[in-house]
Image (cartoon, rainbow, N blue to C red):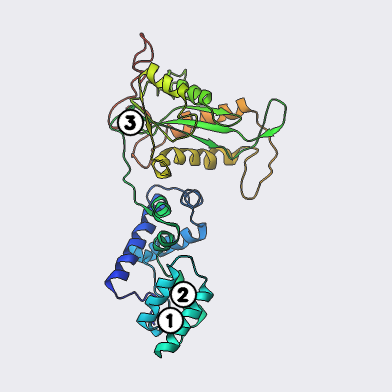
Amino acid sequence: MARDQRFSTAGETAVREHTAKFRWHVLRRHVEDGTPLTQLAGLEGIGVRTLQRWLAAYRRDGVAGLLPVVPKRARRTHPELQTLIEGLALSKPKLSTAAITRKAQAKATQRGWPMVSYSTVRAIVTALDPGMVTLAHQGSAAYRDNYEMIWRHRAEQPNATWQADHTELNIVILDTNQQPVRPWMTGILDDHSRAVCGYMVFLGAPSAMNTALALRHGIWPKNDPDWPMCGVPDRLYVDHGPDFTSDHLAQTAKDVRFEIIYSTVARPQGRGKSERLFGTINTELLADLPGHLSQDQRHPKPVLTLPELDAAIGSFIAETYHQREHPEIDATPRPGSVMGGCHDCRKVSMTSTCCC
């Protein structure tokens, strides 16, 4: 039997094509954008070995290589019995493979069909579309968060929409008492140019004050020719964290005159651009700094202080991140390099002009 034997029914073909499209949707960020597989695995919750297997299949056969294959012994199983096994695997509460095997063997004996083994049942169950299994066992919300294809909106011009988000950085530093601590970062990202308009590195949990300081850094002009981004956004896109829903931020938005847009509850995908920035900092900058946290080094020796880490991140953003082409926009985040013009420093002060 050929290794790449395919299912025959139209319904199964549609499921397999959907699975291949999802796999390509994930994999293209590595193939076309250059996102490392290790970073992609963390963002998507998919094992690195699985992604490596998908990549090998894609390089060998193209997108067609991402189609799921039929278990080798699938043709020995009676079609109705296979349908029964698949139905049992998708039922709630979730049944073990052993329980499904017992039920399938009882039905085979009753109908006089060829007997199925545990390994055959396991092969049929593992060949099911992962999205279908998630939908059956965890519901539509889990399916939507893991498998829904998202239209990636891009703001029409710089400073039209900013995104703000936080992350706990993968590094251990020394606090003022020389004790090891893990810092946080708030990032302010321009949706159109992917420029980092401002940021804040701090100790302790995110707060409205730290968010306000990161916004202030984004709004005001910097004393750095490599960092000309500034201005006031028309909209600020945030999640439902307490610092973003605080009266402090609401008053800031009213005073500075921008609109706060909240992401849909339990929909993390819309904040993927900020998460990608944090992933870049964690994997490209922090990985080379002392105190970096990783799978192999869970208790590193802290060396840097908060001001030293702040300076390293600022230099990386201005001298590296802003200078190179961003794969999603085919241009650097610097003003003037993206369609739509420069970052407008309007509303900063009565005397300020565009800093581009």
Crowd band around label 1 with a 10 angstrom C-alpha radius: few (<14), some (14–19), many (20+) = some
Q: Is residue 116 visible?
A: no
Place of residue 156 in the rendered image (x, y in percent of width and height, measured from the top left)? 28, 32
In the displayed structure image, the side of residue 85 where residue 306 appears, left or right? right
Q: CA distance from mark 3 to mark 2?
A: 52 Å
Is the residue under label 2 in contact with that under label 1 (CB below 8 Å)?
A: yes
Mark 3 is on which residue type? Ser
Q: Which residue is mark 3?
A: 337
352 versus 119 height, above or below? above
The residue at the point 59 percent across, 30 percent down is 309
Give the residue number, with chain letter if any, for mark 2.
123
Q: Residue furthest top?
A: 351
Is 243 placed left or right of 191 in the picture?
right
The x and y percentages for residue 253 are: 39, 21
Query: Tag 2, which secondary structure?
Result: helix
Q: Which amino acid does the dot numbered 1 rest on?
A: Arg
* Residue on which disc 1 sits: 73
Q: Give the camera-side residue of 274 and 145.
A: 145
Judge from the rendering whether residue 172 lies leftward or rightward of residue 193; answer left or right. right
> Is disc 3 placed on a helix, strand or loop?
loop
Who's the residue at 66% across and 46% down the image? Answer: 298
First in sequence: mark 3 or mark 2? 2
The residues tagged by marks 3 and 1 sit, at their Cα atoms, a distance apart of 56 Å
Image quarter hosting the C terminus: top left
Q: Position of residue 71 (x, y in %)?
A: 42, 76
Q: Is residue 93 above or below residue 314?
A: below
